[in-house]
Structure formats: C-alpha cells, structure tokens
Amino acid sequence: MDWGTVLVLVIWLSALLLIWQRAEVKRRRAVTILLLFVGFLTWYWADFRGLASAFWLALVLSLIGSFLFWLLIGRYNPVGSSDDIQVIGMDD
C-alpha cells in the first residue's frame, strides 16, 4: 500500500467531511447529495486504480479525524445562519 496515496485520500476525504460538517442546516441536503456523488466518484476511481484498500483506510482515518474536529471545535462553534449576516454600510 502506497502511504502517499493514503495521505492524499485522507486529505481529500477529510475536506469533503469538513464541508459537510460546516454546511448550513438549510443547505445540508443539497451538500449531502453533492458530496455523496463526489465520494462515489472517488471510490470508483480508487477501485479502478486498484486502491480500494487505501480508500477504505483513508475513509476510516478521515472519519476519526472529522469526529475529533467536531468533538474539540465543532460542538463549541456551531454553524451560523446566512440570515444573521449583516453588511456594514448598508442603509436598510
């Protein structure tokens, strides 16, 4: 197993999980569908290249990392709503 490939896959899958985790609640369904599609394409690519075991190891490591991020940072800093954004200098 090539550890460089595992590292790249861990970074890629962690980024996908982080995007899903920090998505706004109103947009979570669309983000989930998009990221499942991208994840499936990544799995298909890894399987086609003979990297299925590297993909599954990277997925497990990404899930552990994502859980730790949520445990240490995400619970105490919840995702805000786009309705709460105020633009300074607007007259309304």
Image: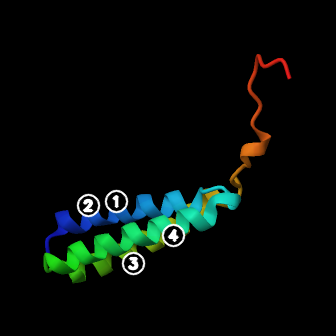
Q: Nearer the viewer, mark 3 or mark 4?
A: 4
Would you name the residue on which mark 1 appears? 11
Q: CA distance from mark 3 to mark 4?
A: 20 Å
Would you name the residue on which mark 3 appears? 60
Identify the amino acid type marked 4.
Answer: Ile
Identify the amino acid type marked 2.
Answer: Val
Q: Quadrant of residue 1?
A: bottom left
* Image side of residue 71 versus residue 9, left or right: right
**Up/down of 26 relative to 47, above or below:** above
Q: CA distance from mark 2 to mark 1?
A: 5 Å
- Residues at marks 3 and 4 touching, judged by CB atoms closer than 8 Å: no
Residue 57 percent location from the top left of the image = 31, 78
54 or 50: nearer the viewer: 50
- Residues at marks 2 and 1 touching, judged by CB atoms closer than 8 Å: yes
Disc 3 crowd, CA 10 A, few/some/many (<14, 14-19, 20+)? few
Q: Quadrant of residue 46?
A: bottom left
